[in-house]
Protein backbone atom coordinates (compact mmCIF):
# COMPACT_ATOMS: atom_id res chain seq x y z
CA UNK A 1 0.00 0.00 0.00
CA UNK A 2 1.13 3.58 -0.53
CA UNK A 3 3.40 5.17 2.07
CA UNK A 4 2.36 7.79 4.65
CA UNK A 5 4.42 10.29 2.66
CA UNK A 6 2.32 9.77 -0.48
CA UNK A 7 -0.96 9.84 1.46
CA UNK A 8 0.13 13.07 3.18
CA UNK A 9 1.03 14.90 -0.03
CA UNK A 10 -2.27 14.01 -1.67
CA UNK A 11 -4.22 14.90 1.48
CA UNK A 12 -2.57 18.31 1.80
CA UNK A 13 -3.17 18.99 -1.89
CA UNK A 14 -6.85 18.13 -1.46
CA UNK A 15 -7.03 20.42 1.58
CA UNK A 16 -5.90 23.35 -0.55
CA UNK A 17 -8.50 22.50 -3.19
CA UNK A 18 -11.32 22.15 -0.63
CA UNK A 19 -10.44 25.21 1.42
CA UNK A 20 -8.78 27.69 -1.00
CA UNK A 21 -9.62 30.75 1.16
CA UNK A 22 -8.27 29.27 4.38
CA UNK A 23 -5.77 31.46 6.24
CA UNK A 24 -4.36 31.10 9.75
CA UNK A 25 -1.33 31.76 11.87
CA UNK A 26 1.72 29.53 11.47
CA UNK A 27 0.94 27.53 14.62
CA UNK A 28 -2.67 26.92 13.63
CA UNK A 29 -1.58 26.03 10.09
CA UNK A 30 0.78 23.36 11.43
CA UNK A 31 -2.02 21.97 13.62
CA UNK A 32 -4.47 21.84 10.69
CA UNK A 33 -1.82 20.27 8.41
CA UNK A 34 -1.17 17.64 11.10
CA UNK A 35 -4.88 16.85 11.35
CA UNK A 36 -5.19 16.63 7.55
CA UNK A 37 -2.21 14.24 7.43
CA UNK A 38 -3.79 12.18 10.24
CA UNK A 39 -7.04 12.03 8.26
CA UNK A 40 -5.28 11.06 5.04
CA UNK A 41 -3.37 8.28 6.81
CA UNK A 42 -6.20 7.23 9.17
CA UNK A 43 -7.04 3.91 7.46
CA UNK A 44 -3.50 2.78 8.30
CA UNK A 45 -4.15 3.17 12.03
CA UNK A 46 -5.06 -0.51 11.87
CA UNK A 47 -1.32 -1.11 12.32
CA UNK A 48 -1.56 -0.08 15.98
CA UNK A 49 -3.36 -3.16 17.35
CA UNK A 50 -0.97 -5.36 15.37
CA UNK A 51 2.03 -3.68 16.99
CA UNK A 52 0.65 -4.60 20.42
CA UNK A 53 0.38 -8.28 19.45
CA UNK A 54 3.83 -8.32 17.83
CA UNK A 55 2.66 -8.47 14.20
CA UNK A 56 2.08 -4.97 12.72
CA UNK A 57 0.47 -6.30 9.53
CA UNK A 58 -1.94 -8.65 11.31
CA UNK A 59 -4.97 -6.33 11.09
CA UNK A 60 -3.77 -4.21 8.15
CA UNK A 61 -5.92 -4.12 5.01
CA UNK A 62 -8.92 -4.84 7.19
CA UNK A 63 -12.06 -2.94 8.05
CA UNK A 64 -10.28 0.41 8.52
CA UNK A 65 -9.86 0.33 4.72
CA UNK A 66 -13.60 0.28 4.04
CA UNK A 67 -16.60 2.39 3.15
CA UNK A 68 -18.12 1.65 6.56
CA UNK A 69 -15.18 3.05 8.50
CA UNK A 70 -14.88 6.02 6.12
CA UNK A 71 -18.50 6.93 6.89
CA UNK A 72 -18.04 6.48 10.66
CA UNK A 73 -14.88 8.63 10.67
CA UNK A 74 -16.26 11.43 8.50
CA UNK A 75 -19.55 11.66 10.43
CA UNK A 76 -17.69 11.60 13.76
CA UNK A 77 -15.37 14.43 12.71
CA UNK A 78 -18.33 16.41 11.34
CA UNK A 79 -20.29 16.01 14.58
CA UNK A 80 -17.28 16.88 16.76
CA UNK A 81 -16.62 20.08 14.84
CA UNK A 82 -20.31 20.98 15.07
CA UNK A 83 -20.47 20.25 18.82
CA UNK A 84 -17.37 22.34 19.51
CA UNK A 85 -18.74 25.10 17.25
CA UNK A 86 -15.89 25.36 14.80
CA UNK A 87 -16.67 27.61 11.85
CA UNK A 88 -17.00 24.78 9.38
CA UNK A 89 -20.13 23.45 7.76
CA UNK A 90 -21.08 19.90 8.76
CA UNK A 91 -21.60 18.84 5.13
CA UNK A 92 -18.33 20.32 3.89
CA UNK A 93 -16.39 18.73 6.75
CA UNK A 94 -17.95 15.30 6.17
CA UNK A 95 -17.30 15.62 2.43
CA UNK A 96 -13.68 16.63 2.98
CA UNK A 97 -12.93 13.79 5.41
CA UNK A 98 -14.59 11.31 3.02
CA UNK A 99 -12.43 12.70 0.20
CA UNK A 100 -9.29 12.30 2.33
CA UNK A 101 -10.11 8.70 3.20
CA UNK A 102 -11.10 7.82 -0.36
CA UNK A 103 -7.84 9.33 -1.63
CA UNK A 104 -6.13 6.84 0.69
CA UNK A 105 -8.17 4.00 -0.81
CA UNK A 106 -7.39 5.14 -4.36
CA UNK A 107 -3.64 5.21 -3.73
CA UNK A 108 -3.73 1.83 -1.99
CA UNK A 109 -5.82 0.37 -4.82
CA UNK A 110 -3.08 1.22 -7.34
CA UNK A 111 -0.15 0.11 -5.17
CA UNK A 112 1.54 -3.25 -5.71
CA UNK A 113 0.64 -5.64 -2.88
CA UNK A 114 2.68 -8.81 -2.30
CA UNK A 115 1.37 -9.78 1.12
CA UNK A 116 -1.96 -11.44 1.88
CA UNK A 117 -4.66 -10.42 2.12
CA UNK A 118 -4.22 -8.78 -1.27
CA UNK A 119 -6.12 -5.51 -1.44
CA UNK A 120 -8.70 -4.31 1.07
CA UNK A 121 -12.45 -4.77 1.79
CA UNK A 122 -13.57 -1.48 0.21
CA UNK A 123 -17.31 -2.18 0.36
CA UNK A 124 -17.50 -3.56 3.91
CA UNK A 125 -20.06 -3.85 5.60
CA UNK A 126 -21.94 -4.62 2.37
CA UNK A 127 -19.33 -7.03 1.01
CA UNK A 128 -16.20 -8.74 2.35
CA UNK A 129 -14.63 -8.86 -1.13
CA UNK A 130 -11.08 -7.52 -1.28
CA UNK A 131 -10.21 -5.07 -4.06
CA UNK A 132 -6.83 -4.33 -5.69
CA UNK A 133 -5.93 -3.09 -9.14
CA UNK A 134 -4.61 -5.73 -11.53
CA UNK A 135 -2.36 -2.97 -12.92
CA UNK A 136 -0.42 -1.40 -10.04
CA UNK A 137 1.08 2.02 -10.69
CA UNK A 138 2.80 2.59 -7.34
CA UNK A 139 5.57 0.31 -6.05
CA UNK A 140 5.24 -2.13 -3.19
CA UNK A 141 5.95 -0.61 0.24
CA UNK A 142 8.16 -2.86 2.34
CA UNK A 143 7.07 -2.80 6.00
CA UNK A 144 9.63 -5.18 7.47
CA UNK A 145 12.56 -3.17 8.86
CA UNK A 146 14.59 -6.37 9.24
CA UNK A 147 14.42 -7.04 5.49
CA UNK A 148 17.82 -6.16 3.92
CA UNK A 149 15.98 -4.61 0.94
CA UNK A 150 13.98 -2.22 3.14
CA UNK A 151 16.05 0.93 2.50
CA UNK A 152 16.40 0.35 -1.24
CA UNK A 153 12.65 -0.15 -1.44
CA UNK A 154 11.96 2.92 0.73
CA UNK A 155 14.09 5.12 -1.53
CA UNK A 156 12.30 3.77 -4.60
CA UNK A 157 8.86 4.43 -3.06
CA UNK A 158 9.89 7.95 -1.95
CA UNK A 159 11.18 8.74 -5.46
CA UNK A 160 8.11 7.44 -7.28
CA UNK A 161 5.67 9.12 -4.88
CA UNK A 162 7.60 12.39 -5.13
CA UNK A 163 7.37 12.28 -8.92
CA UNK A 164 3.62 11.61 -8.81
CA UNK A 165 2.42 13.58 -5.80
CA UNK A 166 4.73 16.58 -5.27
CA UNK A 167 3.52 18.16 -8.56
CA UNK A 168 -0.10 17.56 -7.47
CA UNK A 169 0.50 19.18 -4.07
CA UNK A 170 2.41 22.10 -5.60
CA UNK A 171 -0.30 22.69 -8.24
CA UNK A 172 -3.08 22.68 -5.60
CA UNK A 173 -1.09 25.04 -3.39
CA UNK A 174 -0.39 27.40 -6.33
CA UNK A 175 -4.02 27.36 -7.48
CA UNK A 176 -5.04 28.43 -3.99
CA UNK A 177 -2.52 31.27 -3.97
CA UNK A 178 -3.49 32.41 -7.49
CA UNK A 179 -7.20 32.24 -6.66
CA UNK A 180 -6.73 34.27 -3.47
CA UNK A 181 -4.81 36.99 -5.33
CA UNK A 182 -7.83 37.46 -7.60
CA UNK A 183 -10.35 37.67 -4.77
CA UNK A 184 -11.61 41.16 -3.85
CA UNK A 185 -10.03 42.45 -0.68
Image (spheres, rainbow, N blue to C red):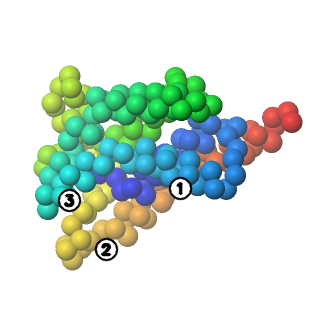
Q: Which of marks 2 and 1 is nearer the N terminus?
A: 2
Label 2 vs label 1: CA separation?
A: 21 Å
Whole-percent x, y for residue 55 in the image: 14, 59
> Which residue lies at the image location 31% right of the left edge and 73% below the top edge?
152
Mark 1: which secondary structure? helix
Whole-percent x, y for residue 9 in the image: 49, 52
Q: Which mark is residue 166?
A: 1
Left or right placement of residue 4 versus residue 51 in this view: right
Q: Residue 51 carries which label?
A: 3
Whole-percent x, y for residue 91 in the image: 52, 23
Q: In which quarter of the image is the C terminus?
A: top right
> Which residue lies at the image location 17% right of the left edge and 25% below the top edge?
127
Whole-percent x, y for residue 110 in the image: 32, 45
> How many numbered discs sit on the rendered protein?
3
One can see residue 109 in this view: yes
Q: Which of 98 and 48 is in front in this view?
A: 48
Left or right placement of residue 116 versus residue 111 in this view: left
Q: Nearer the viewer, residue 1 or 26?
A: 26
Q: Residue 151 carries which label?
A: 2
Q: Residue 105 carries which label?
A: none
Image vertical order of residue 62 relative to residue 165, above or below: above
Amino acid sequence: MSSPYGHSLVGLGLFHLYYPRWFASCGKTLLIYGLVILGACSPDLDFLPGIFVGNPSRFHHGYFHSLGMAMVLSLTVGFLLTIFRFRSSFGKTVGFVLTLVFSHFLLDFFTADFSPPYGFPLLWPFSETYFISPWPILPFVERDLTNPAFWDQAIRVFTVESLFFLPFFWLCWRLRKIGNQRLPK
